[in-house]
Image: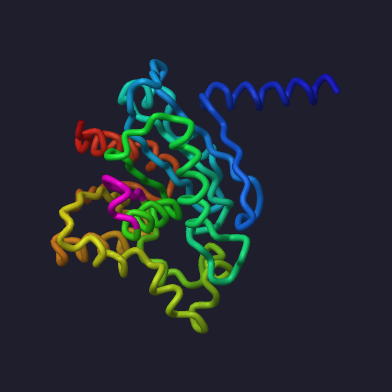
């Protein structure tokens, strides 16, 4: 019993170190309670407004993944961001699944999570950003491309920016149905096919991928489509694969990029 209490204390203590707040949100159209870690500047003053960054984790990860990749407490204080890391339920792909009634994540994000953040913190609504890794890179770009007037900008690191390239991977068929039987669902939910929503909007994005990453060609194709459509993109490539080692370095560029876009 003593050991169990000790380990419980360690778990709670570790969450306290990483997070200044933990939000639990329920909804009928998600599989279970969603947990979000929120990192707030240490000098947070509710009389002021703060830019907001959502950070989406990868497939098989959870709400704590980004706090293991970067010191988000320190970044929130240094750069003056409020940072929100929600749980994407292992493999939701952050969409409203046409196959699963209890996996309507886009609805949850905008109808539950966003209002909760707005009610609890004083957000500068002209400076809202979103980024993510792998599955979360898909999710971040997906939300930005479908709601370009809500976000200031978006980022993706090692993102699966064309899901149609990987029809047998990461249990996506559970979300979208089989590619053979439901190709329209795959095409309609693939980031690269949504880029037309940004045409003539002059909105900047950041995308990076390691040159040894299995998603590198997909990211290159996404970059090429941006160029063809005249969408301003900061595209970064360099040594690295689909790994924590790469993401720990790549995410630094996203914070710097978003900070450079902040307007008062």
Q: Give the residue at the far bottom of this rendering.
A: 181
Is 64 on the left or on the right of 224, as rendered? right
Above or below: residue 164 compared with residue 219: below
Specify whether residue 108 is painted magenta: no
Q: Give the residue at the far top of this rendering.
A: 43
Residue beneath the point at 52% across and 34% down? 37
Residue beneath the point at 48% across and 57% down? 106
Is 102 on the left or on the right of 137, as rendered? right
Above or below: residue 28 compared with residue 41: below
Above or below: residue 175 compared with residue 202: below
Specify whether residue 150 is painted magenta: yes
Counting from the top left corner in percent of width and height, residue 253 is at: 27, 38
Q: Give the residue at the far right of this rendering.
A: 1
Please tell me which residue lies in front, 80 or 157.
80
Counting from the top left corner in percent of width and height, residue 15 is at: 58, 27
Count of numbered marks: 0
Q: Name the image quarter holding residue 54.
A: top left
Looking at the picture, the colour scheme in use is rainbow
Give the quarter of the figure containing the C terminus: top left
Residue beneath the point at 36% across and 36% down? 52
Please tell me which residue lies in front, 219 or 118.
118
Counting from the top left corner in percent of width and height, residue 80 is at: 32, 25
Residue beneath the point at 83% across and 19% down? 2
Q: Which residues are magenta?
A: 147-157
Above or below: residue 256 compared with residue 241: above
Give the quarter of the figure containing the N terminus: top right
Counting from the top left corner in percent of width and height, residue 260 is at: 20, 35
């Amino acid at each position: 019993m003593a050991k169990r209490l000790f380990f419980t204390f360690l778990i709670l203590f570790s969450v306290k170190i990483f997070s200044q707040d933990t939000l639990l949100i329920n909804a009928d159209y998600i599989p279970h309670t969603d947990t979000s870690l929120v990192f707030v500047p240490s000098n947070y003053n509710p009389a002021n407004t703060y830019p907001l960054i959502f950070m989406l984790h990868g497939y098989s990860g959870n709400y704590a993944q980004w706090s293991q990749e970067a010191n988000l407490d320190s970044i929130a204080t240094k750069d003056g961001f409020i940072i929100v890391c929600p749980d994407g339920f292992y493999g939701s792909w952050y969409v409203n699944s046409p196959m699963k009634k209890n996996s309507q994540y886009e609805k949850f994000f905008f109808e539950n999570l966003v209002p909760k953040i707005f009610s609890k913190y004083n957000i500068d609504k002209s400076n809202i950003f979103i980024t993510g890794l792998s599955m979360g890179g898909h999710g971040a770009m997906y939300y930005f491309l479908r709601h370009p007037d809500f976000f200031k900008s978006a980022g993706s690191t090692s993102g699966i920016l064309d899901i149609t390239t990987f029809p047998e991977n990461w249990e996506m068929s559970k979300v979208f149905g089989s590619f053979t039987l439901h190709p329209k669902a795959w095409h309609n939910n693939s980031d690269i096919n949504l880029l037309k929503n940004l045409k003539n909007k002059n909105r900047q994005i950041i995308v990076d991928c390691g040159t040894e990453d299995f998603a590198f060609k997909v990211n290159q194709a996404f970059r090429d489509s941006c160029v063809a459509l005249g969408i301003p993109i900061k595209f970064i490539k360099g040594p690295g694969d689909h790994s924590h080692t790469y993401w720990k370095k790549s995410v630094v560029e996203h914070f710097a990029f978003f900070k450079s876009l902040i307007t008062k």
